[in-house]
Image (tube, rainbow, N blue to C red):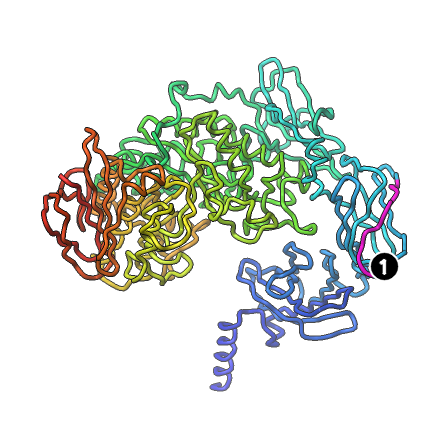
Amino acid sequence: MKLLNKLKIFIAMIFFFFGTITEITIAEDHYKVSINYKRFDQEYKNWNLWLWEEGREGKEVFFQEDTSYGKNRVVEIKKDRDVTKVGFLLKRGQWEDRDVPKDRYILLNKENIDVYLIEGDEKIYDSLESVDLVPTIKYGEISKLNEIKFKLMIPLERGENSFKVVDSNGKEYSIKEVVAQGDKIVEGSLILDEKLDLDRAYTLYTKNHDPISLVANSVFSEGDFERRYTYNGDDLGATYSKESTKFRVWSPIAESVSLNLYREGNGDNLIKTLSMKKDKKGTWYLEVKEDLENIYYTYTVKVNGEESEAVDLYARSVGVNGDRGMILDLGKTNPVGWEDINQTKIAKMSDAMVYEIHIRDFSIDKSSGIGAKGKYLGMIEEGSRNSEGDLTGIDHLKDLGVTHIQILPSADYASVDEIRLDTAQFNWGYDPKNYNVPEGSYSSNPYDGRVRVKEFKEMVQGLHKKGIGVIMDVVYNHTAYTENSNFNKIVPNYYYRKNEGNFSNASACGNETASERAMMRKYIVDSVVYWAKEYKVDGFRFDLMGIHDIETMNLVREALDKVNPNIIIYGEPWAASESPLSEDLRSVKRNTMKLNRIGVFNDDIRDGIKGSVFNSKDRGFATGKTGEEERIKFGIVGATKHSQVNYNEPWANSPIQSINYASAHDNLTLWDKINSSVEGSLEEKIRMNKLSAAIVFTSQGVPFFQGGEEILRSKPMENGGFNSNSYNANDGVNSIKWNEKTVNKDVYDYYKGLIEFRKSNSGLRMSTTADVQKNLEFLNGLPKDVIGYIIKQKNSSGKSEEIMVIHNGSKKDFLLELPENSWNIYANDEKAGDKKLGEVEKRVEIPRVSTLILKSK
């Protein structure tokens, strides 16, 4: 018995350290899966498997046996009623290459399972007899209108003229030249005698291979295609009037396009299907001369012989779950008094103070006291208070004093099922489905496409009445779906970047959009202009802006300036992974100076304040790490050039391009980061939080902070620790706990005071590098881990005065000898505001881990 118990413990330990994909043979408790892999080139070096059980983490698994078929690995998977399939990818080395890039799954439906895989073939064969051993051409693409790129599984002898290109009408195209290297042909190009029409399907044939349907991709970037098919009109989508509705969709490679009209946004209620006519510049057009108000619609697009039903990319609203567009009289969705509402006004971008919030987080907790929980209307519900009587919701925002809120993605996204809103569902919304439509789960009725439009406008109107601007977090860098996205159904492959037939993935979400292509660029510009005009939003935060090309972002700025030059634009100056578009052309941080009045998130000051976001234990200036003075000073001058800063090369043209922050929705909240990296008393940690905020609000640029940071927002996990990526966690993790405002009232008041002080002092809001260089001077001779500087400014009466800011990141109090002036104190280690807290002359003590703000008398 003791021996058996020891064996059980030993096996349990192996499961703990190595997961459940093992080679331990306990047949009655395990599925035995034999995976066989054949490559036609016989090059198996560094090829291995990545396996994961359904819903669980994956791991690398190596092939072990050589067989007459190829390579083999037997894995045993412990039986679990929650696991019905195992997923796998075939990869080379550290993801240098993948055989078939899509996830594939093996059903666990019997104890002994045999699987046969072939290079380049996504089919999973269940027996050796069923395997098709004739290789398919590995890759075939129309790269130019008269050129086809190809890659073969099996080499051909040079001189073998076995290539054929045939279209869907049976016409064969004459090949002028085969361009390839070496004695044996593996890859190359076919040069044709005539140009191809892309509204037909084409098949490539050659010796010893199954044929392949040719795809179009890089041809879309060719000048010939752009000249022929770029459409510059402003009437894409459905243009409604009572007399008729005009439909125009861009699909230059379609064989046919049809319009489907429905009574409702879902269900079996088709009214009729009408054929559209091919029109100018690759568009298809139809005018329906009847009143179609509130009718739903889709397009059926036929490409390469296959039909797909898609939602209009320019749809203004949709039915439940965004599967059908809706034809609206947009004027009827305007709230009473909408004509009197315009974008909020700020003199310059550095006057903005941005509060980031997720619509559901803001009101869903019972402590919010808000009735319309998790909804657009919950954002503007007045009079709400927590259980202790403190203000919550919009009144909290007004009292706090922020100028703008940035709402996490609120355009229609895919991950929340709007039919099941009675169940607990949550997502941040970075999985866009319909870009020009408000998300339905935040409306009071997602089935009626009019409601989400009107309630979004009511939200903007209510916030504007409080003097608060609305910045939309927009996600044009990728789509929720790839092959089955509306973009790809309407013009396959056009809207995405690809690598040799595979979708590139700089977003780490399965795809990345090709903003450099004319019609994707037009779509992004058209979309933001639509939101700015129709919904009167005040700004846009671009998710993973480093994926977008610089020219597109500057065209966004140019277009929005025509609507209102006060509209704010900023974004994340990075991508999540490598992109095939050269970094020199993309809106990454080092190219910020090439961007016109577009801000970027300043990760230098972020990590300088609290430590790296990728290491929960790492600390920064405010949390006890020494030697961070230069990095913080770099943030203080808004990443611009300053003779007293010796950190990195400046990357900002002016301080308005620097979005300064200590926390955002990504990664740990500021309070959780402090608690993860610091061992100390509650009082000491609160000092660190206040110091972090003071650095952000006294630096040049645009201060930004995560909603709830001002009341020490936390996202604890049930099993301990804190959630650093709560994109799909529950409300218990994500919601703002408004009772924490009462508990942490002193922290809230400190943030409120910093905002008041910043608003009252123009020297903290300079907008040019020249002004910063002229008016901001760092103090010399300060102790280690202490930063001090003086700003010259003119007050509201035109009188010259000075602001002195001292950040003490050390654990020691120190005595500062002051310049000759007499000074008033406006912030110390306890309080901040635009009313003086006291007076001081000659010298002043700056407590440990705190900020002191003085103004000359």
Overall secondary structure of the magenta section: strand
Q: Quadrant of the rendered structure where residue 472 is?
A: top left
- Residue closer to the observer: 152 or 557: 557
Residue 656 in the image: x percent, y percent? 38, 39
Residue 530 in the image: x percent, y percent? 51, 28
- Residue closer to the observer: 96 or 802: 802
Q: State left or right for residue 836 relative to residue 456.
A: left
Looking at the image, residue 115 lies above or below residue 529: below
Q: State left or right for residue 25 relative to residue 171.
A: left
The residue depicted at 19 percent of the width and 35 percent of the height is: 800
Given the image, on which type of amino acid does mark 1 rest?
A: Leu
Q: Residues within 10 Å of mark 1 (few under 14, many from 20)?
A: some
The residue depicted at 65 percent of the width and 70 percent of the height is: 32
Looking at the image, residue 540 lies above or below residue 853: above
Residues rendered magenta in the picture: 172-182
- Residue closer to the observer: 716 or 173: 173
Which quadrant would the C terminus be assigned to in this image?
top left
- The secondary element bearing badge 1 is classed as strand
